Image: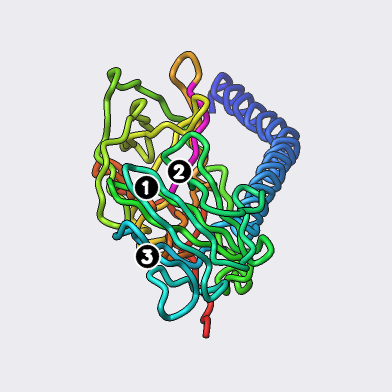
Amino acid sequence: MPHWRHCLTIGLVALLVACGETADNEDPYARAEAARLDAAFAAETRSWQEQRQARLVAPDGWTSLIGLHRIELKSHFIGSGARSGIRLAMGPEKLGLLQSGDGAYWFTPERGVAVTLDGQPVRGRVRLRSDADTTPGTLGFDDGKGALSVIERGGSAFVRARHEDAPSRLRFGGIEYWPTARDWQVEATFAPAAAGATLPIANILGMVEDTPTPGQVAFEREGTRYTLDALDGGDGTLFLIFADRTSGHGSYSAGRYLDAPAPGADGRLRLDFNRAYNPPCAFTAYATCPLPPANNRLDLAVPAGEKAYRKPAIA
């Protein structure tokens, strides 16, 4: 072998050995740092999961709902008795009379039944403000364990009832999650919509309402670009309603929700699909969940976040 080739071969071997030694020397530190970041991320996600489940089973959480009753007449007697126009699943046989007219709601308690309005004892006929009001009211009964409120959706009004002793709350079965993966934290960009832009958003009751949209979020996954129409999450944050290829195949069939942070000045933000969560309708039949708009039905499987809830058998 010519001398120059011999020297070059020796040099290349030495360089490869040196690089290998450098990589070996650096690799344990890189692995340790990656493991530390993974552990911290998993701990943060686990804390979020615990807080999420605690909110669901709180005395006024979604699992405490016991009824959703459309207000169809100007007067409805409310109670758990068979003759009540709005029959409660739990509570006094006769609770009181609900009256409505000109967009206002009034409640008169049954004689001898203890009822509160926003924590204060009700002595006679009182106005019950719906959730369309800036200060909605709540009626309490059963020593505060039960609650009634009026909600308005799509031009209709409903009485929503909840109770701390709801079987769906007391027998809550917990939520299953896909394994936490930092890979499902994705970088995204936000494009603001024109002023006054709206989206037609359907809810699970079949009602459609034009809802203001602040804009659209875009992200890439394995070389494909996806977009999600956003709703206002409050304080500049974004609320995303989406379905994906796991919907009905591991995750809740009607889709999931995702809260996103406020975009930066450059329009950038990060979406963490590990925190994709089920809408209230996954846990109760008495919610009015908004459903994903057409653009938000992704041709992509998102095996991250909450899986479909398995409701326990309730006698």
Residue 8 figure quarter: top right
In the image, farthest residue toward the bottom? 315
- Callout 1, which amino acid? Glu
Residue identified by numbered label 2: 131
Residue 229: which disc? none
Query: Callout 3: few (<14), some (14-19), or many (20+) C-alpha neighbours within 10 Å?
Result: few
Query: What residue did someone put label 1 on?
Result: 152
Q: Are marks 2 and 1 in contact (CB under 8 Å)?
A: yes
Q: Which residues are magenta?
A: 257-263
* Residue 283 percent coordinates (x, y): 48, 64
Amino acid at dot 2: Asp
In this view, 109 is above or below 180: below
Count residues near mark 1 (Cα–Cα under 10 Å), then give few for <14, some for 14-19, many for 20+.
some
The tag earlier along the polypeptide, 3 or 1, is: 1
Q: Which residue is mark 3?
A: 249
Give residue 35's quadrant in the image.
top right
Given this view, does label 3 or label 2 mark the residue nearer the observer? 2
243 vs 296: above or below:
below
Residue at image position (26%, 36%) is 210
Q: CA distance from mark 3 to mark 1?
A: 32 Å
Q: Position of residue 308 (x, y in %)?
A: 46, 64
Residue 261 belongs to magenta span: yes
Residue 314 in view, yes or no: yes
Tell me where residue 48 appears, x and y as whole percent: 64, 47
SS at mark 1 in the image: strand
Q: Is residue 256 magenta?
A: no
Residue type pointed to by label 3:
His
Q: Give the mark nearer the N terminus: 2 vs 1.
A: 2
The front one of 157 and 181 is: 157
